[in-house]
Image (cartoon, rainbow, N blue to C red):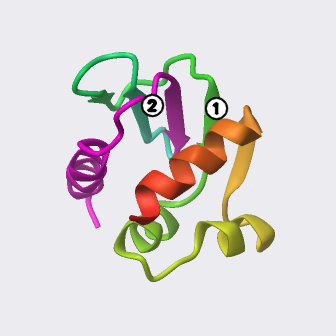
């Protein structure tokens, strides 16, 4: 799974993210990042390592599985496949957006 494919999937899901006024950073390891700026309309996505309200550390495989609906983000968190730094409440809100 390429980073561009994952970004495309996130972009499609963020269309429905009305009122998601926050920044998120996915740290995928190996110097791969996806930054979402929900303060923009439509949300702006980039591959830069920028400051964010919440940072989610995971692998590209786990993130892709979450986006496809084959991996529950809550289970990934409990299995330590997904780590959260920052605003946990915001991570839960993002969870609902990415699962749908």
Q: Residue at x 44, y 52 (%)?
A: 97
Residue 25 is situated, as x and y percent measured from the top left of the image, at 52, 33
Q: Which mark is residue 5?
A: none
Q: Nearer the viewer, residue 32 or 14?
A: 14
Left or right of 61, for residue 52 = right
Residue 43 is situated, as x and y percent measured from the top left of the image, at 29, 28
- Whole-Å distance between the Cαs marked 1 and 2? 13 Å
How would you rate the neighbour count of disc 2 (Cα within 10 Å): few for under 14, some for 14-19, many for 20 or more?
some
- Residue behind mark 1: 54
Q: Nearer the viewer, residue 25 or 16?
A: 16
Residue 86 is situated, as x and y percent measured from the top left of the image, at 74, 31
Q: Residue at x 77, y 74 (%)?
A: 79
Quadrant occupied by the N terminus: bottom left
Give the label, 1 or 2, closer to the camera. 2
- Image: magenta residue range: 1-27
- Residue behind mark 2: 20
Left or right of 42, for residue 28 = right
Residue 17 is situated, as x and y percent measured from the top left of the image, at 35, 40
Height in image: 27 above or below 47? below
């Amino acid at each position: 799974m390429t980073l561009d494919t994952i970004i495309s999937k996130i972009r499609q899901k963020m269309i429905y993210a009305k009122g998601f006024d926050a920044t998120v950073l996915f740290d995928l390891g190996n110097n791969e990042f996806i930054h979402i700026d929900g303060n923009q309309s439509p949300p702006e996505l980039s591959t830069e390592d920028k400051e964010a309200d919440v940072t989610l550390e995971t692998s590209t495989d786990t993130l892709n599985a979450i986006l496809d609906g084959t991996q529950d983000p809550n289970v990934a968190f409990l299995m330590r496949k997904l780590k959260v730094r920052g605003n946990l409440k915001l991570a839960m809100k993002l969870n609902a957006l990415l699962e749908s």
